[in-house]
Image (spheres, grey):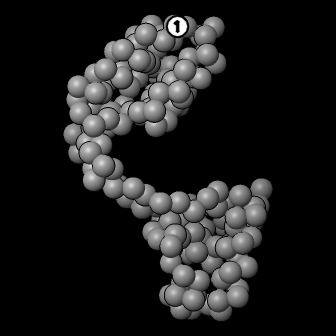
Amino acid sequence: MHKFDELDMRILSELTRDASISVPRLSKKLNINASVLYSRIKRLSKRSLVKKFTVVVNESMLGINVKATVGINRDPKLKEPIHGELLKIPEVRSVSEVTGRFDMIVTVSAHTLEELHNVVIERIGKIEGIQNTETFVEMQRTEKEPLYTTQSAGISR
């Protein structure tokens, strides 16, 4: 396991809040030398703690107003083909294998409830091996940025 210290965790927390922040601005905010910060960020990326820097899109501005979670039960023998077919559906955003009453949880985004219905019934429900689905439509979401600390990373001081 890689060793990460408190400064690594502070950098990670700040980048999680705003990955577009400049190195000079972040170095001032963290009160460290810009070259030290740059090398730390490079090291965090090289060690795969930072997987990528990305953009979060305001999907409602694109008319994508419906988000749902779909619980799926499937034929265990058809796990791989089902997974592959789900990933071909543009509205499917993620596929997770889970424990509990469902075999898989799929997140879906759509423009309207009618579009969501068509995706779940006509696309997902018709994949060979899918036995049943249950859809949970998101009514409201509150997201929280993670705060990374040496404790959350399992690092003792």
Say above or below: 85 vs 4.
Answer: above
Between 100 and 18, which is closer to the camera in this rendering? 18
Q: How many marks?
A: 1
For the point 57% across and 89% down, the residue is: 24
Residue 134 in sight here: no
Residue 15 in the image, given as x and y percentages of width and height: 53, 70
Residue 115 in sight here: yes
Identify the secondary structure beneath mark 1: loop
Say above or below: 86 vs 2.
Answer: above
**Side (left or right) of 138 relative to 25:** left
Between 24 and 85, which is closer to the camera in this rendering? 85
Q: Quadrant of residue 91?
A: top left
**Side (left or right) of 49 relative to 60:** right
For the point 71% across and 58% down, the residue is: 48
Task: Tell me the crowding category of disc 1: few under 14, some 14 to 19, or many 20 or more residues within 10 angstroms, Cα based.
Answer: some
For the point 51% across and 24% down, the residue is: 86
Q: Quadrant of residue 33?
A: bottom right
Question: Which image quarter is the N terminus in?
Answer: bottom right
Question: Which image quarter is the C terminus in?
Answer: bottom right
Residue 150 in the image, given as x and y percentages of width and height: 60, 68
Say above or below: 102 vs 143.
Answer: above
Give the residue number, with chain letter if any, for mark 1: 129
Please, what is the three-letter code of the amino acid marked with disc 1? Gly
Residue 49 in the image, given as x and y percentages of width and height: 67, 60
For the point 70% across and 86% down, the residue is: 36
Residue 53 in the image, given as x and y percentages of width and height: 57, 62
**Side (left or right) of 19 relative to 150:** left
